[in-house]
Amino acid sequence: MKTSTARKKKIAPPKPPKIRVMIVDDHPLFRAGLHRVLELEKDLEIVGEAANGQDALTQARALKPQVILMDVNLPNLNGLQVTRELTASRQDVAVIVLTAYHDDEQMLHAIRAGGSAYFPKDVDPQELIRAIHEASKGNYVLNDAVLAKPQVATWLLNQFEQMPMSGTDGSEFAFQPLSTREMEILTCITRGKSNKEIAQQLGISRQTVKNHMTSILRKLAVNDRTQAAVYALKRGWIRLQDAR
């Protein structure tokens, strides 16, 4: 009898699909830097880039990335507005917010808007790559901790309780995302427009402007429109060139 020396070839297990990543930033040099870092990772695929908020929304809906690296300081719509739009419309995407305006309050706004992670722009590349992997699995990365979704609610509550609130009696509204209309009004305020001028520009009543203004002050936990304008500019929600 002849003995078969042929060996069955081992079938390699299929490779897991790459994580689809999109980069959103209005600075070409920063986008290029992120691109170079991410393209070295064999399990990441860069599927798109955008330089403004509206383009980011359009591309995200068309390209369906799993993870978006989102700058805050963007033309048209800021990064928090885009994040809120995507997560509110149940887009299956995790958003990692990147900002040059880093503070604890900005982090709270980012997570309340629907972000899965938050980093200053000088984040270590390997830390960012780790966050991309965690976010793609539905986890949250906050202050070096990896949290599941139920843990984030507890984290937010603890952070909110520890955060000193200034001036307003509506602290229960603080850190809620501003609506699109509220952001329009806040942009007008940074340009020094009066309630009457804002009403005329947006085609709404002065009373409606006042109502939105009250909501803005509560959400930002500030005392007046000047503080609200400074708050938004300091955190990059409104670009300085758009406030002129």
Image (spheres, grey):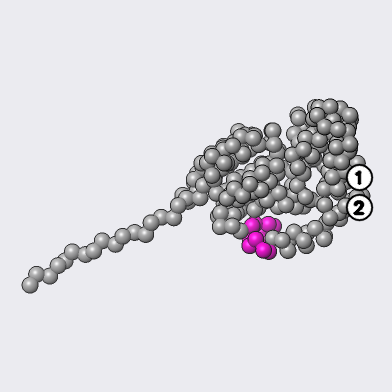
Answer left or right for 71 relative to 243: left
Q: Nearer the viewer, mark 1 or mark 2?
A: 2
N-term mark: 1 or 2 = 2
Quarter occupied by residue 14:
bottom left
Amino acid bearing label 1: Asn
Range covered by the magenta-colored residues: 140-151
Residue at 9% x, 69% y: name it. Answer: 2
Residue at 77% x, 32% y: name it. Answer: 240
Answer left or right for 109 relative to 42: right
Instruction: Give how far across and how far down residue 228 sits, in percent.
Output: 85, 41
Q: Is residue 148 magenta?
A: yes
Q: Is residue 177 above or below residue 196?
A: below
Given residues 50 and 130, the one toward you in this image is 50
Q: Is residue 129 magenta?
A: no
Q: Is residue 196 above or below residue 150?
A: above
Residue at 45% x, 52% y: name it. Answer: 17
Instruction: Give how far across and how far down residue 126 sits, in percent.
Output: 58, 52
Q: Is residue 227 above or below residue 92?
A: above
Which residue is label 1 attached to?
Answer: 223
Instruction: Give how far across and how far down residue 20 sits, in percent.
Output: 51, 47
Residue at 69% x, 36% y: name it. Answer: 77
Amino acid bearing label 2: Asp
Quadrant of the snapshot with the C terminus: top right
Residues packed near mark 2 inside 10 Å, few (<14), some (14 to 19) or many (20 plus): some
In space, the residues marked 1 and 2 are separated at their CA atoms by 10 Å
Which residue is label 2 attached to?
Answer: 169
Given residues 44 and 208, the one toward you in this image is 208
Answer left or right for 111 relative to 219: left
Residue lying at the far left of the rendered structure:
1
Given residues 211 and 177, the one toward you in this image is 211
Instruction: Give how far across and how far down residue 125 sits, in percent.
Output: 59, 49
